[in-house]
Amino acid sequence: MTEIENMLPWERDIYVDKLVTWIKEENQRTIEQNRKQSHG
């Protein structure tokens, strides 16, 4: 967490944006996997 606190505001914005994008992609991947398993 210290790394995030020490970031410049624009660095933090980019980091958070990338993190949100990654989380959305992971959620989508999980949904797809669940869909495939349930229709097995």
Image (cartoon, helix red, strand yellow):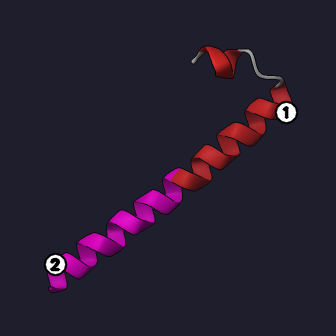
Whether residue 31 is in magenta: the answer is yes
Magenta range: 23-40
> Spatial distance from mark 1 to mark 2, Cα to Cα?
42 Å
For the stretch drawn in magenta, what is the main secondary structure? helix
In the image, 10: left or right of 38?
Answer: right
Q: Which residue is mark 2?
A: 38
- Residue 14 screen position, x and y as percent: 76, 41
Where does the C terminus fall, quadrant-wise?
Answer: bottom left
Q: Residue at x 57, y 18 (%)?
A: 1
Please, what is the three-letter code of the amino acid marked with disc 2? Ser
Q: Residue at x 55, y 53 (%)?
A: 22
Q: Residue at x 82, y 26 (%)?
A: 9
Q: In the rendered structure, which disc, 1 or 2, sits on the residue that comes first in sequence?
A: 1
Corner quadrant of residue 4: top right
Which disc is residue 10 wearing?
1
Q: Residue at x 50, y 51 (%)?
A: 23
Mark 1 falls on what kind of element? helix
- Residue 30 screen position, x and y as percent: 34, 64
Mark 2 falls on what kind of element? helix
Q: From this view, report whether residue 39 is shown above or below residue 12.
A: below
Local packing at callout 1 (Cα closer than 10 Å; few below 14, some 14-19, many 20+) is few
Please, what is the three-letter code of the amino acid marked with disc 1? Trp
Q: From this view, report whether residue 7 is shown above or below residue 19.
A: above
